[in-house]
Image (cartoon, rainbow, N blue to C red):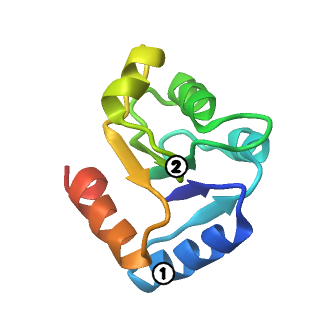
Amino acid sequence: MLLVDDENDILLVFKKSLEAHGYLVDIFNEPRNALINFKPDYYDVILLDVRMPHINGFDLARAIWQKQPTARICLMTAFEIYEDEAKKVFKDLKTHCFLKKPMTPKALIEHIEKHLVNA
């Protein structure tokens, strides 16, 4: 799993919780580094924060899809955003997974398993 968020606290809490549930997790707090180190066909699930410096989550998702069109990406945000509205603005957005922060690690794991792993 790839997890990209500019908030280190979130990265560390989610990484620890996900790894406790058996997931292998690579984390990046800088989206440019995540893109440079991205390995196509390596990650089963990719979680991206929407608001990050230098590259936002939407643009990072597009760049990842250029490298791997089948990547399963979930976008996370602390701001009100709805999938239908995002798809109106970002017409090439393929993701069907949006998460509202803050969320508990348990809620994150349940969402990942329902919408990404077992979808």
Task: State which quadrant residue 40 falls in.
Answer: top right
Q: From the viewer's perspective, is 28 left or right of 88? A: right
* Residue at 69% across, 39% down: 35
Task: State which quadrant residue 72 falls in.
Answer: top left
Residue carrying label 2: 77
Q: Position of residue 61 (x, y in %)?
A: 54, 33
Task: State which quadrant residue 62 falls in.
Answer: top right
Q: Nearer the viewer, residue 84 or 105?
A: 84
Q: From the viewer's perspective, is 19 left or right of 37? A: left
Residue type marked 1: Ser
User: Which mark's residue is nearer the viewer, 2 or 1?
Assistant: 2
* Residue at 19% across, 49% down: 119
Disc number for residue 5: none
Residue carrying label 1: 17
Residue 79 appears in view: yes
Q: Position of residue 18 (x, y in %)?
A: 46, 75
For label 1, the crowd category at 10 Å Cα-Cα, with few meaning under 14, some 14 to 19 and many 20 or more, is some
Return the disc, 2 or 1, that comes first in the chain's sequence: 1
Q: From the viewer's perspective, is 23 left or right of 83? A: right
Q: Position of residue 8 (x, y in %)?
A: 72, 68
Q: Is residue 116 above or below residue 90?
A: below
Residue 43 appears in view: no
Q: Residue furthest bottom?
A: 20
Residue type marked 2: Thr
